[in-house]
Amino acid sequence: MKIHVAYYAKLREERGCSEESLDTETATATALYEHLRNEHGFTLSEAQLRVVINEEFAAWDAPIHAGDTVVFIPPVAGG
Amino acid sequence: MFSLSETPLDLGMLRAATRDVEAGGFAAFEGWVRNRNEGKEVRSLEYEAYPAVAIKEGNRILAEAKDRFGVIHAECTHRTGHLALEDIAVWVGVSAAHRGEAFEACRYIIDEVKLRVPIWKKEHYVDGDSGWVNCERCAARGHGHDHAHHPHGHGAAPVQPAAYYARQLKLPEVGPAGQDRLAHARVLVVGAGGLGAAALPALAAAGVGHIGICDGDRIEISNLHRQTIYTLHQAGQPKAAAAADYLRALNPFVQVQTHPEKLTPDNVEAMLVDYDIVLDCTDNFEAKFLLNDAAIAYGKILVQASIYQYEGQIFVVNPHREGPCLRCVWPEMPDPGCVGSCAEAGVLGAVPAVFGAMQSMEALKILLDLPRQPENTMIFFDLLTLRTRRVTVNRNHSGCVCQSGKKELAWESHTGLELSWEAVEAAQGALLVIDIREEAEREAAPLDCPNLAFPASVFPLQHPPMSVDQRTVLCCSRGFRSRYLAMALRKAGFPNVYSLSNGLQSLHPTHVAP
């Protein structure tokens, strides 16, 4: 299935882009992140991030459907 | 002594202060409120002073008079507040051995006070109009004294609030009623750094009547590219006072109060109590979580913003509308290492300027009751792509502070986490010192004692080279990064790790890299 993924802050830096379209069969947010982490060597663990699915903060075990937008958000404190 | 008085002057007491057995003469001058000025009929007037500077400058003038004319006592008191016709506005009294020097000193003092002391008056005219009037101090071009904090421009014409706010009053949603609402508003800005330096002038210029500035830091050279209310020659000065000076010069119709200290669990309640809205312009999680918990506990609207390189986020916590809070997203304060500070990650000055201005806009929207986004919306704004993402935050865990209904601070203090430099020195080498600043910071200002280098940015991929039993103190420039890292290491099973309180800047300012 095709989904849309976006990255913020340190993840954007590590991925080298802010968003991309993916073809994936991963069923949950946690599985998707694990897959991307292996692929791109992200330094942040799931526990340090929040996941947003279709513009709403979601649980890591939330299911992913075709056409969803999944966003990974690290904490940010600069000022 | 020079003093300011909000109440009518007690002439008997003032005169008594000049009595002296060696004095053979006494001269006094009284300035009164009269019924006309420059052809206009005056009904009453108001004096406003910039007290800290007024008293200092006034006392300097009295000392000069004593020195120059050899008088025995010199006293001067200036009224502030609302005065009626015939009230005494200013009183000068001098006692001396002979009448000549008493008269001369008296004349000198009143002339200099009018010229140099930052006190200005607003006249209320019989025709219902009012205006800040010109005075000698501002007219004295090239006199070399500070012309700031004065409600009129370089010309002689008085500045009227209606002229100052003209473009804003034109907005149908603002108008005189909205402007009046702003004039009665009280907004606290915590952090006068990148975000605060943009938010503060926007609030002051809009006419937010009472603005508080909380910041315990001093201006550093490396701040200036993004904190543009400060100038090069102010480096080293306290930020809160410098920012207040800027705002007073920008808009004399607003009151500015400084809180030149770091926000702590002990002072946060007293700090917030007098304000309606708080802008979180801080740059560290500890302050952000403390402000979040305090806003919930004390019922204050909190406008948060955080930036990272070219992006940022903005979120309003509104306990009055039972909105969600920061802990609905992050129940626990995040560990260090998963986020970079401006020193580690870098920042382009325009980024905090955008987000600080957005924070001031959020405060104005609330104060003016303008249309706005739903309370549970967190906005993510990427300034590279200009993509805005509006994410819904649900109050979905029942244990959150915003649902506890408690009117006390939920903050856990981390007592015993910090060590002073005195304590480090007293340990005489029994304590391992780890410098967690980045390489460039260390090179710019090396730490002058045996230490190990371990940049905070490599955590948590790597752990510092320390053992569980070894007492260790972590040092950074201001004590924020070291505090996070010490907390994280304690969670990871290192009970003997500490953070150097207030960082290396407290030892020597050169430890803060330019």
Image: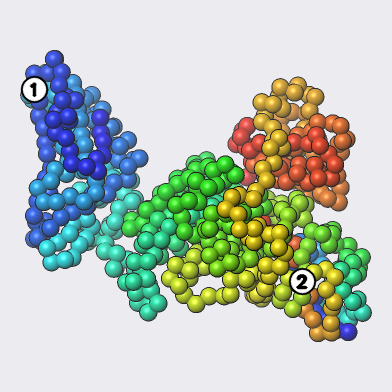
Which circle marks residue B25 in the picture? 1
B373 up-or-down from B263: above or below: below
Name the residue: 69% across, 26% down: B423
Which chain is disc 1 placed on? B
Q: Quadrant of the C terminus of chain B?
A: top right
Residue A11 percent coordinates (x, y): 78, 64
Residue B327 percent coordinates (x, y): 68, 59
Residue B302 percent coordinates (x, y): 55, 60
Name the residue: 18% across, 41% down: B8
Name the residue: 17% across, 50% down: B83
Task: State the residue in front, B163 or A54.
Answer: A54
How much space separates mark 2 and mark 1, taking CA atoms?
Answer: 84 Å
B177 up-or-down from B188: above or below: below
Which circle marks residue B89 in the picture? none
Which circle marks residue A58 in the picture? 2
Question: Are there few (<14), some (14-19), or many (20+) residues within 10 Å of tag 2?
Answer: many
Establish whether labels 2 and 1 are both on one chain.
Answer: no
Give the left or right position of residue A17, taking residue B197 as reference. Answer: right
B42 up-or-down from B361: above or below: above
Residue A77 percent coordinates (x, y): 66, 56
Which chain is disc 2 placed on? A
Q: Identity of the amino acid at label 2?
A: Ala
